[in-house]
Amino acid sequence: MTRVSATLAHSRLTRDLLAHDVQLACLLEVAAPKPGNITPGRDFADTTYADMVRSALALGPVFARRRVRRRRVGELIADGVRATARVAPTNTNLGIVLLFAPLARAAVTRRAGEGLRAAMERTLAQLDVDDAAAAFAAIARAGPGGLGDAPEHDVRAPARVTLREAMAAAAHRDSIASEYVTGYAIVFGTALPLLVGALGDGVATLDAIVSLHVGLLASHPDTLIARKAGPEAALAVTRAAREVRDGTRSLADFDASLRGCDHRLNPGTSADLVAATLLAALLSGVTLP
């Protein structure tokens, strides 16, 4: 058992399991030495590993089960951004919050015998304009890297469509938006099988998370890199990840190639998808030893 999971194991027996699944997913994601990301001992100039840990812990109360029952997806997104802003100086987890909010709502509203992905699809289908308005304000407040000006449904303008419709307009340039449209096709169709497969092969949890991260990069160009450095740079990172996956390039060399003073090659969207996959795994009963 990793130190992070051991720290939370006892409290999970006596407190809100959803809140602790959220915290555990975030803590395991940042604890794994994933190439190009913030990890223990590898800070960015404006964000530290400690900032990420504080942000992970801050999301627990936001996603407490009884609270999630009373809040819509858009409200949960806004609550998550506000909670993070109180403990971190910069945007540390907007993508995670955007992905976690529908997952948490699906988990607490799941019907008897209903799978998590089916509950997710139902949750996404119920999103409305109020969800969009709350999410737009939260995204604008967080100020994610590479936000720019959207040709339609700009988050700094009033919302006029449902949150899922707004995400559909951005799906071609943002994998998180695409997940809202496809019912989390990357998380459930690509990432969760990668994680379960690695764990089933006996790979240690943090190593399995690194393998998942590389596998995601190898199959889906990171859209944060594409926004910051251009689509060719994102494709080059995907090609390099395939070399790591296939054993023709070392993980250390890949990691070094991604790190720079401006973090333009930080695969942050892939890290967010890793966190969402870990939460989906926990909510589906997968053990992260």
Image: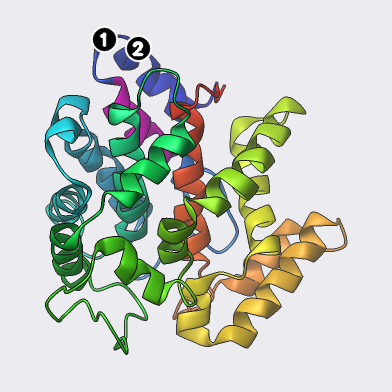
- Looking at the rendered structure, which numbered label has been put on residue 14? 1
Read off the magenta span: 17-25
Amino acid carrying label 1: it is: Thr
Residue displayed at 78% across by 59% down: 244
The secondary structure type at the circle numbered 2 is helix
Residue displayed at 46% across by 82% down: 227
x, y percent for residue 170: 40, 75
- Looking at the rendered structure, which numbered label has been put on residue 10? 2
Q: Is residue 146 magenta?
A: no
Q: Quadrant of the N terminus?
A: top right
Amino acid carrying label 2: it is: His
x, y percent for residue 73: 22, 48
Give the number of callouts.
2
Q: Is residue 232 in sight in this rendering? A: yes
Residue 265 placement, left or right of 71: right
x, y percent for residue 277: 51, 42
Residue displayed at 54% across by 44% down: 32
Q: In the image, which is nearer the foreground, mark 1 or mark 2?
A: 1
What crowding class fits label 2: few (fewer than 14 Cα within 10 Å), some (14-19), or many (20 or more)?
few
